[in-house]
Image (cartoon, rainbow, N blue to C red):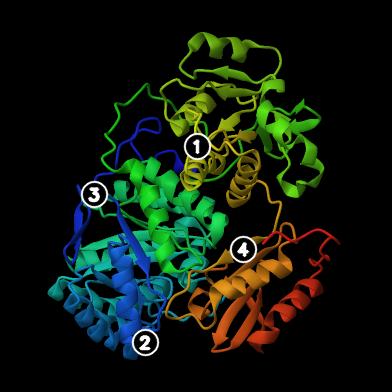
Amino acid sequence: MSDHALLRYCPDLLAYQRRTTREVKVGKVGIGGDNPVRVQSMITSDTRDTPACVAEVLQLAEAGCEIVRITAQTKIYAANLENIAREVRAAGCDVPLVADIHFKPDAALEAAKWVEKVRVNPGNYADKKKFEIREYSDDQYADELERIREEFAPLVELCKSLGRAMRIGTNHGSLSDRIMNRYGDSPRGMVESAFEFARIAREMDYHNFVFSMKASNPKVMIEAYRLLVARLHQEGSDWNYPIHLGVTEAGDGEDGRIKSAIGIGSLLADGIGDTIRVSLTEDAIHEIPVARALAAPFLNKPAQAAGPALEASYDPFSYERRKSETLEIMNHELGGEKPVRVFTSQEKWNAVAHKIAKMGDFKPEIILEKSGVVEIDPRDENALAALNSAPQARLVTVKDEIGLDVIPAFRMLACRLDARHPILLKDTLSPAAGAVDFVDTLLTASRHIGSLLCDGIGDAIIVQGEQAPGQSLRLSYNILQAAGTRIFKTDYVACPSCGRTLFNLQHTTQKIRAATGHLKGVRIAVMGCIVNGPGEMADADFGYVGGAPGKINLYVGKQAVKFNIPEGEAVERLIDLIREHGKWIDAPAGEPVEV
């Protein structure tokens, strides 16, 4: 904790206060300042196809999307933004357009003429990654920064003169060689990468920009954004730039929504985030209701009065699981290094008791009413004193209906309770008796439980907000998986489709899931193009990446090992690759693979 002892990313871990930022104008839309959290998305059509792009922009705007991003991978693609922007405005739509730029400065300079905002990725803007391992001397590092300045300064000058906004958007895994060699593939490397570009912009007196720190792993994403905000605060009050939040390659279905809610929702709960994008491997239109639902609890949420000052029981910038003692309850060990267990109520257990043997990975493990759990108000000094002086460790949770938000309540409990006592996390402290929309339950549970798990708090979980027994158990396990806490099935990192994609991502992702969904603990990345290739799938065991139209490259980790495989053969060749590396097992006979 010593490295981070002086860093603070929010004023109070127990009381909500939205981070104060300057306003950045993107066309007519303000980001940060007093504006609500803005919702963004990205179209999937080929940028050269004007009618398709215009139709998709208008559809997204109609659904409530406030800012729309379009890929511009080369100058030729960027030039067509003129036609897209003209037709969108002619249709009476004034939603700001953003050009997504990765490797090509000339594409950025062209795009800035036609759209309200340009997104650059410092890891690959004017950088060709060779994944070289070498030590940069200070002089060599300075030479690299001067080279970047020469490439980046013209774009800053143009954006400044035309009143364009910019996003300096770092992605975990697509960091430059100089950053990788000095800081590693780490949250600190992500922050330093963005600061290199921000300093150039500031020296040119350009301030109309926002930051982002996206990663496919919610733990890494949360740590990187917290570190960014803490470092901005350290730099001074005029580094108060807005923040764009996103989990890259979240995937599809429930998994994609859960992963997004953990990353985006937990940061919003701490007052961080001025604009968000939920990246789903689905049609972009489906991202908007999820993003709006994630932002909704924080619209006009009043700042809360600070409570008693408590030192956090965990390092917010570096994951470590809370060191509790191991207990055995209903023949399951929990606490310490044991798996985080899944609880259910007696009523729900009774409802599924006849089919527990057939529930596969979604079995309930412990009944709440039989667990001996101690329920307390973490503000109750007497209850805390009794537990902390007790000779034996006990399982402890927060009492329902005590008027506290879930995340601060469990943080307070973890701070004030001796670490030896394991903690049972709840998704809500106000379980509803009637029916609740499942997506709202899913997003709330993921935000609350997932955030705490990513901080190392929690030895067991219970989802109380979902009445259906099977759904509540599935949700519990999927949250554990998305938080990286308990891996019980194949983990997929799948990028959202965009104009760069070289195959049908949705169809291919489902096909790969159907073939590999039984491989527990294997992480597979499905990437539409080389931009989201070796960098974005930094944590994956195997990668399936579009190399050219109809052709697939296969990766082991960051290393491409098979090239230009016809798309029709690629899934079988991926299975062969997994088999070669000793990670393949045949699907159990007679049991359906979860798709």
- Looking at numbered disc 3 in the image, what kind of residue is underneath it? Thr
> In the image, is 35 to the left or to the right of 425?
left
Mark 4 near mark 3, Cβ–Cβ under 8 Å? Answer: no
Residue 3 lies, with reference to residue 107, above or below; the image says above
Q: Which residue is mark 3?
A: 21
- Numbered label attached to residue 435: 1
* Cα separation between marks 3 and 2: 33 Å
Residue 473 lies, with reference to residue 284, above or below; the image says above
Based on the displayed image, in which of its 4 quarters is residue 29 positioned? bottom left
- Looking at numbered disc 1 in the image, what kind of residue is underneath it? Ala
Residue nearest the observer in this picture, 551 or 44: 44
* Cα separation between marks 4 and 2: 29 Å
Mark 4: secondary structure? strand
Q: Residues within 10 Å of mark 2 (few under 14, many from 20)?
A: some
Which comes before the other along the chain, label 4 or label 2?
Answer: 2
Mark 1: secondary structure? loop
Q: Residues within 10 Å of mark 4 (few under 14, many from 20)?
A: many
Mark 2: secondary structure? loop
Q: Which residue is mark 2?
A: 74
* Cα separation between marks 4 and 3: 35 Å
Mark 3 near mark 2, Cβ–Cβ under 8 Å? Answer: no
- Numbered label attached to residue 152: none
Specify the quadrant that holds the C terminus.
bottom right
Q: Residues within 10 Å of mark 1 (few under 14, many from 20)?
A: few
Based on the displayed image, in which of its 4 quarters is residue 564 positioned? bottom right
Q: Nearer the viewer's eye, disc 4 or disc 3? A: 4
Residue at 29% from the left image edge and 51% from the top image edge: 37
Residue nearest the observer in this picture, 235 or 317: 317
